[in-house]
């Protein structure tokens, strides 16, 4: 009996994805089984969870399991689970569409190069569709737990443009997937091969994955065909096993299951914690950032279990935002099974678990930073910008996070951030008591900034901060290891003990001598500036802008404006001029007042441009420059 048969088209993206996947993942085709088992296991977890409040969903069949059978003649492999199943709407939503945000951006990244795309596709998590790597027709029949047998749904597709859906009778709860194999895939129709694949990729699955017992031989050598099933995997939750019983490969395969990722993790931490809260954590750092790392709405990756029962997937309570890339499992012994999102929000117990897990992750990162620099560099490349948020977000662990930060500085030979704050301090000059930094839009803007001139002259290292999040970092991290972090573009230049008496005396004389020109420029610029002063900061440039010690940096102000955020009005920069520069000397000698005013404005506008700023009135700037050029050549 079948009603309501309809043919539906795949979302365009699904079509594209199917095509790409089949080609790029073919060399690793066995993973189709891992992906389908992973889904069946998730379905069992969901049923166990919903069954806590609604035991009738178990329908007198409480032993959750996955069964795999095959039929040599029909050339099919069948996977059957008695998990939560799906309703018709759920089948359409989960199997016919990719309902993930960022899908479009993902497709734009695809290059057509099979190897690169294979990586991306894995990261996108195309689990179910991987069936089409080996199958030319896939039939999925399912019924959601608790629904009547008349509400079964059958989905069939050849993995091309469309699929059919019909409502069917289905007594058995859960999902059955029949793969009709492509030509040439017959080697999969083999007991031994399938068992090997299951053991290789899915041994960690916590419910039994059953296959028919192998045939045995009677006393007279006759074949006894067995209809009994036996578990092929160990069927205990991996994280509950003791560390020395788990192989590296098993840890990796488990990661792929919990994280829905196709690549190996970078590192992991597995521990049973006892004390006020008893729990087990198995937490992973992925090797690559997911494409939607910056999507605040995205699911978080740590799953919460209570005494082996899956409770929820994406609780923002389990990991802070700045560790949102962490994947894995936390299994509590103490929380109540009926714990809800609302309870979690206010739970002191969860706070304790979370802070324990954060410490584990930071410990793991410290260990990498210390003992595996290459891996740590990979980590930093992928997730450094996210970890930086922690400096402002996690007050209790600020120092530890600060130690993990990596920067580019004026001594870096490449653009790779490798310098830690401790490295910096270890190299500080005699008499230097501050950690100097500059914020800018790009590394070249930072490297060429006039603000760095005196530091270059004195050989003092300056950190070059060019990530958007850096302004937030320096806003929260004002000190490290007793050393103040100082912007080179804020406040009057104070090199402290880096200057000797002779320097200071010379500077005083320069200031004295520059008084008249400072006054001239001040008068010409009027309201445009807070003040004008002579500086020893510059060696090559005629002028630069600085803001007050406690004012918002010009760079941050630009970032906020770009983002359409309000910025406080009324703070004006100070123009610092270099009295040794020929242009400034020329201005001092200029007799014509109008030309002096023009020169002063040009100095200001140049300084603004040099630090990456935008002119309010570019046309007037251009007019002034043109006028000055003509006068010079006249
Ligand atoms: P993912 O597992 O990363 O969500 P998949 O492509 O593997 O992506 O699966 C898509 C969705 O289809 C799952 O999230 C789930 O909602 C649904 N699904 C797949 N297989 C099953 C199954 N055996 N039982 C119930 N739901 C399933
Ligand atoms: Mg999946």
Image: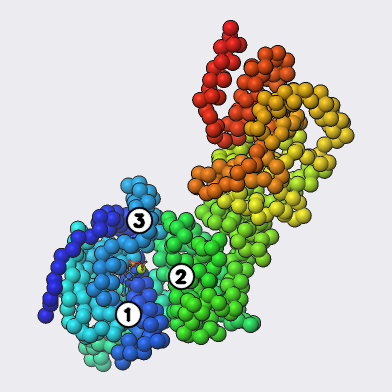
Q: Which mark is residue 455?
A: none
C-alpha span from label 2 to label 3: 20 Å
Report the residue marked by disc 2: 314
Quadrant location, ligand no. 1: bottom left
| Residue 296 image position (x, y, % from top left) | 47, 60
CB of mark 3 near ligand 1 (< 8 Å): no
| Residue 200 image position (x, y, % from top left) | 40, 71
Report the quarter where the C terminus lies: top right
Residue plotted at (18% across, 83% down): 150
Q: Secondary structure at mark 2?
A: loop
Query: Earlier along the polypeptide chain: callout 1 or callout 2?
Result: 1
CB of mark 1 near ligand 1 (< 8 Å): yes
Specify whether residue 118 is in view: no
Q: Is residue 186 left or right of residue 475?
A: left
Report the residue marked by disc 1: 84
C-alpha span from label 3 to label 1: 27 Å
C-alpha span from label 1 to label 2: 19 Å
| Residue 633 image position (x, y, % from top left) | 58, 9
| Residue 347 image position (x, y, % from top left) | 56, 78
Q: Are marks 3 and 1 in contact (CB under 8 Å)?
A: no
Query: Earlier along the polypeptide chain: callout 2 or callout 3?
Result: 3
């Amino acid at each position: 009996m079948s009603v309501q048969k309809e043919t539906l088209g795949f979302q365009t993206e699904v079509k594209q994805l199917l095509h790409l996947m089949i080609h790029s993942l073919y060399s690793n085709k066995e993973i189709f089984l891992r992906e389908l088992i992973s889904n069946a296991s998730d379905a069992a977890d969901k049923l166990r969870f919903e069954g806590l409040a609604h035991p009738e969903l178990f329908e007198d069949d409480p032993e959750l399991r996955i069964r795999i059978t095959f039929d040599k003649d029909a050339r099919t492999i069948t996977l059957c689970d008695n998990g939560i199943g799906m309703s018709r709407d759920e089948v359409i939503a989960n199997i016919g569409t990719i309902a993930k945000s960022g899908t479009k951006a993902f497709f734009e990244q695809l290059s057509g190069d099979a190897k690169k795309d294979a990586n991306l596709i894995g990261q996108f998590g195309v689990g179910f569709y991987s069936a089409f790597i080996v199958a030319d027709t896939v039939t999925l029949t399912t019924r959601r737990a608790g629904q009547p047998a008349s509400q079964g749904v059958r989905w069939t597709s050849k993995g091309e443009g469309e699929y059919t859906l019909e409502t069917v009778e289905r007594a058995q709860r859960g999902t059955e997937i029949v793969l009709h194999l492509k030509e040439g895939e017959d080697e999969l129709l083999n007991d031994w091969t399938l068992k090997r694949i299951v053991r290789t990729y899915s041994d960690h699955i916590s419910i039994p994955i059953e296959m028919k017992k192998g045939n045995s031989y009677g006393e007279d050598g006759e074949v006894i065909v067995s209809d009994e099933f036996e578990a092929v995997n160990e069927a205990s939750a991996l994280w509950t096993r003791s560390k020395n019983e788990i192989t590296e490969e098993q840890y990796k395969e488990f990661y792929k299951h919990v994280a829905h990722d196709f690549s190996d993790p970078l590192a992991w931490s597995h521990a049973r914690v006892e004390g006020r809260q008893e729990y087990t954590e198995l937490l992973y750092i992925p090797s690559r950032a997911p494409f939607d790392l910056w999507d605040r709405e995205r699911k978080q990756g740590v799953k919460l279990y209570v005494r082996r029962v899956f409770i929820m997937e994406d609780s923002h309570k389990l990991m802070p935002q700045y560790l949102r890339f962490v994947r894995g499992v936390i299994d509590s012994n103490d929380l109540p099974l009926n714990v809800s999102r609302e309870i979690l929000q206010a739970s002191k117990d969860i706070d304790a678990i979370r802070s324990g897990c954060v410490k584990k992750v930071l410990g793991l990162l410290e260990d990498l930073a210390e003992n595996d620099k290459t891996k740590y560099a990979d980590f930093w490349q992928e997730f450094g910008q996210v970890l930086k948020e922690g400096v402002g977000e996690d007050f209790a662990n600020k120092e530890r996070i600060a130690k993990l930060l990596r920067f580019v500085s004026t001594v870096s030979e490449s653009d790779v951030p490798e310098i830690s704050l401790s490295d910096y301090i270890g190299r500080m000059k005699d008499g230097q008591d501050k950690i100097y930094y500059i914020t800018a839009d790009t590394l070249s803007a930072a490297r060429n900034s006039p603000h760095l001139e005196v530091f270059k002259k004195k050989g003092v290292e300056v950190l070059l901060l060019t990530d958007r999040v850096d302004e937030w970092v320096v806003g929260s991290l004002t000190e490290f290891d007793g050393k103040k972090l100082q912007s080179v573009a804020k406040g009057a230049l104070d090199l402290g003990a880096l200057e000797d008496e002779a320097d200071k005396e010379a500077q005083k004389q320069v200031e004295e001598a520059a008084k008249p020109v400072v006054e001239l420029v001040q008068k010409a610029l009027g309201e445009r500036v807070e003040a004008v002063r002579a500086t020893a900061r510059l060696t090559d440039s005629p002028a630069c802008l600085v803001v007050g010690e406690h004012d918002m940096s010009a760079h941050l102000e630009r970032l906020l404006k770009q983002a359409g955020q309000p910025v406080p009005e009324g703070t004006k920069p100070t123009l610092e001029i270099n009295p040794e520069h020929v242009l400034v000397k020329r201005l001092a000698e200029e007799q014509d007042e109008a030309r002096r005013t023009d020169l002063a404005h040009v100095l200001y506008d140049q300084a603004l441009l040099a630090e990456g700023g935008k002119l309010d009135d570019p046309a007037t700037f251009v007019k002034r420059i043109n006028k000055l050029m003509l006068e010079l050549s006249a």
